[in-house]
Image (cartoon, helix red, strand yellow):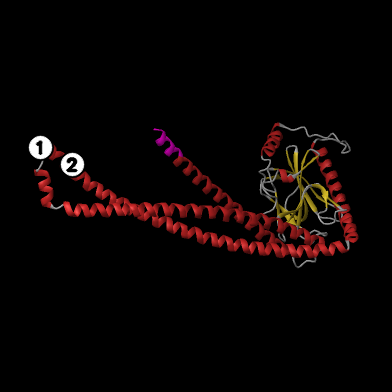
């Protein structure tokens, strides 16, 4: 009983391990395909912006994005190769076990056939039955002959089945080895490209190091401009909230929208979708994240953003991330257009549009096109600044948008 239970447990563990391995393999493949797609999109976006003159700092930022993504891809390739190697080794062991069992089965079958050939003539069968001491014994001998014949047929079937299984495992092993070679080749190409990107980045960093003071002044000047834009956007959003709340003054810091039941439902739904909101562009990557941090190259300088800056393809379209209503369309002096959408007491802001498709008061559905994204003066890339607010609280969009 214990032996039977132990055998069942072993079979269960093997099946569970196989299913778990298959799931992990599928997950790794999904991750790899997503990263490959992301690299292709980044390359496509950067290629569409390549003709425009870009600063050394911007080039470093672009390369950093590609390097980070390619490093993730290489890690996934390594994991896939290791997993496939384990599967190949396990499959090889199974083939050896099955081959030995098949060899033993064929040997036993051959002995049985030789023995049957010597004794299983028609005359011998008749004598075997006639020599029975009773009718019951003759009946039992007939049953034995039938069982022996069935056993021989079953042994033949088992040989055929195991031969087919061995052939199937051999074909699977061949496919696995071919897949591994393909993965190794792609991984090698990814590593070679990663090294080229890293070398190019090091050359650019060396240029920056030589004139660090100059670049520090450029970064600070750029940050001053960004801070002015952020401050102006905050003022506009504050005024929009005040207007929605029917308050006369926008100078109060304790502004909070008094929501109708319908608006509260919209706000609740927006909140429930935290981490699941769609990207505000079809293709793109986060060039600058939310918050304040030291510059990765010029350590003495800091970069800050009240939202995220997303680099996208030329003439890319900004899209609404959730249902709502356009509460304001604005134009910054010396800058570009922006659109603020209200979702209850949440607001999403889309800035740096050279053309706007919507109007104030217009109802919006998730995915609606808001406008054409402009080329940033500082970066010379097609860049959308995307922000999320809860009343006047500035939130990190990377916590709200799916896999941002």
Which residue, given by chain and number where applicable, does mark 2 sit on?
A: 143
Tell me how far mark 2 sits from mark 1, CA to CA: 12 Å
SS at mark 1?
helix
Q: In the rendered image of this protein, does residue 312 appear above or below residue 11?
A: below
At horizontal 84% and vertical 44% (from top left) the residue drawn is 234
- Answer left or right for 60 relative to 248: left
Magenta span: chief secondary structure: helix
- Answer left or right for 238 relative to 29: right
Q: Position of residue 83 (x, y in %)?
A: 55, 52
Magenta highlight on residue 21? no
Q: Quadrant of residue 193?
A: bottom right
Magenta highlight on residue 4? yes
Q: Position of residue 25 (x, y in %)?
A: 55, 51
Say which of 392 and 60 sits in front: 60
Which residue range is magenta in the image?
Answer: 1-9
Say which of 269 and 46 sits in front: 46
Q: Which mark is residue 1?
A: none
Which residue, given by chain and number where applicable, does mark 1 sit on?
A: 135
Q: In the rendered image of this protein, does residue 180 appear above or below residue 319?
A: below
Q: Quadrant of the N terminus?
A: top left
Mark 2 neighbour class, 10 Å CA radius: few under 14, some 14 to 19, many 20 or more: few
């Amino acid at each position: 009983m214990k032996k039977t239970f132990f055998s069942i447990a072993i079979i269960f563990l093997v099946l569970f391990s196989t299913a778990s391995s298959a799931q992990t393999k599928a997950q790794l493949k999904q991750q790899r395909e997503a990263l490959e797609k992301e690299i292709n999109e980044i390359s496509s976006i950067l290629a569409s912006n390549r003709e425009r003159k870009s600063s050394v700092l911007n080039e470093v930022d672009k390369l950093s994005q590609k390097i980070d993504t390619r490093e993730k891809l290489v890690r996934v390739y390594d994991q896939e190769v290791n997993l496939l190697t384990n599967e190949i080794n396990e499959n090889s062991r199974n083939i050896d076990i099955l081959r030995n069992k098949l060899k033993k089965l064929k040997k036993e079958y051959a002995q049985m056939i030789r023995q049957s050939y010597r004794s299983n003539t028609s005359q011998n069968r008749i004598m075997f039955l006639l020599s029975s001491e009773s009718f019951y014994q003759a009946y039992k001998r007939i049953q034995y002959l039938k069982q022996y014949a069935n056993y021989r047929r079953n042994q033949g079937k088992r040989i055929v089945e195991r031969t087919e299984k061995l052939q199937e495992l051999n074909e699977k092993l061949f496919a696995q080895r071919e897949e591994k070679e393909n993965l190794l080749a792609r991984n090698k190409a990814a590593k070679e490209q990663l090294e080229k990107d890293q070398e190019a980045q090091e050359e650019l960093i060396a240029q920056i190091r030589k004139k660090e003071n100059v670049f520090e002044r450029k970064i600070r000047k750029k940050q001053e401009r960004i801070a002015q834009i952020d401050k102006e956007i905050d003022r506009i959003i504050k005024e929009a909230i005040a207007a929605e709340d029917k308050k006369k003054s926008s100078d109060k810091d304790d502004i909070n929208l008094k929501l109708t039941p319908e608006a509260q439902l919209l706000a609740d739904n927006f909140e429930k979708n935290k981490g699941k909101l769609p990207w505000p562009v079809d293709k793109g990557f986060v060039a600058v994240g939310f918050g304040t941090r030291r510059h990765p190259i010029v350590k003495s300088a800091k970069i800050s953003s009240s939202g995220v800056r997303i680099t996208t393809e030329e003439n890319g379209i900004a899209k609404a991330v959730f249902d709502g209503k356009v509460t304001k369309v604005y134009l910054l002096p010396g800058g570009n257009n922006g659109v603020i959408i209200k979702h209850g007491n949440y607001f999403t802001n889309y800035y740096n549009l050279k053309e706007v498709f919507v109007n104030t008061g217009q109802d919006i559905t998730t995915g609606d096109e808001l406008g054409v994204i402009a080329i940033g003066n500082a970066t010379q890339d097609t860049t959308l600044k995307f922000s999320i607010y809860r009343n006047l609280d500035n939130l990190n969009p990377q916590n709200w948008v799916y896999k941002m």
